[in-house]
Amino acid sequence: GQEIKVLANIGSREDALLASDNGAEGVGLYRLEKLFLSKKSLPTTEELAQELEDTMTILEGMPVTIRLLDVGGDKVLPSIDSPTETNPALGRRGIRLLLSFEELLDTQLRVLLHLSQRYDIRVLAPMVTVAKDMALLRGFIEDTAKELGCPVPPLGAMIETPAAALCAKEISRYADFFSFGTNDLTQYTMAAGRENSYVANYFVENHPAVLRLMQLAIEGASDLPFEVCGELASSIESLPKLLERGIRQLSVAPLAVPIVKEGIRRLSLKQC
Ligand code: PEP
Ligand code: MG
């Protein structure tokens, strides 16, 4: 009797087609990195709007969560002047970079606000650590919405750092929903790079340390919905652990959607 939604993670028009063909109930994470990193210069408002619109039409009215650009760290955007950092994973990444390059943020907000008037769109902030950054982002989106004369779409925060998990309550003052990015949450909790094969045995996505942090976040901000969009969402073995913590929305790679749905149907919530 409980509805559990399975959505898709996408990064392109092709992914959107796959998501739709595989029965996704929407998009829980639309990564913009591919779109930005494939260009030598920053896309204009018109270019970005056109590319996103092409994808939105494929998704035919389904809910779509678009994440603001998550670059910095190991993903360097050639079109912005940001010096190389010695420890990029702990550097100016995600929301930190967006708040430092206002034009980059402004273009995205304008396009998303325009689209949100015709499509079911939510906006998601990457790599949040402190509530202050979310407060600044909320201020930007509210100001831009006022200027454009449109409502503010739901704004969510990725929970993918231990600081964000432990301060979910403070962050919830500026957020409408949360999405666990378990790939980064695992890397930052276990102190093991997500692509470093030497420490792959420490990168354990369902480690009790990661699950306990998730639990603390959910308990800390119990009035907001929590979703999962990292790889852990498609781990059939870990499904009971997510559902028993109250997760009711998962977002997974398009091809994993039917497998995860099948995994959920085989479970009874009493077993979780
Ligand atoms: C994550 O960190 O779990 C996540 C979904 O974001 P990305 O993989 O794009 O860093
Ligand atoms: Mg991440």
Image (cartoon, rainbow, N blue to C red):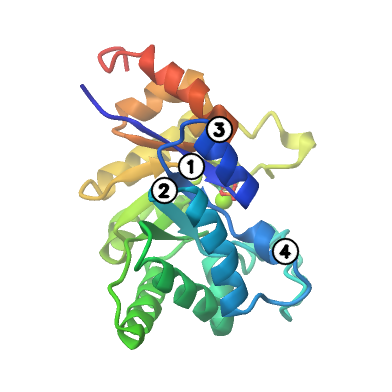
Respond yes or no on whether mark 1 lies under 8 Å from ligand 1: yes
* Quarter occupied by the C terminus: top left
Task: Kindly report the distance in space between the C-alpha atoms of the residues bearing marks 2 and 1.
Answer: 6 Å
Q: Earlier in the sequence, mark 1 or mark 3?
A: 3
Amino acid type, callout 1: Cys
Quarter of the image with the N terminus in it: top left
Residue pointed to by mark 2: 179
Q: CA distance from mark 4 to mark 3?
A: 27 Å
Q: Which amino acid is tagged 4?
A: Leu
Please report the residue visible at 32 percent of the width from the left and 30 percent of the height from the top: 4
Which numbered disc flags the more N-terminal residue, 2 or 4? 4
Which residue is under mark 3?
Answer: 205
Contact check, label 2 and label 4, Cβ < 8 Å: no
Residue 229, disc:
1
Mark 3 and mark 2 lie on one chain; the one further toward the N terminus is 2
In the picture of the structure, the residue carrying the numbered disc 4 is 37
Nearer mark to the viewer, of 1 and 3? 1
Q: Can the viewer see residue 134 in this picture?
A: yes
Q: Are marks 2 and 1 in contact (CB under 8 Å)?
A: yes
Mark 4 or mark 3: whose residue is earlier in sequence: 4
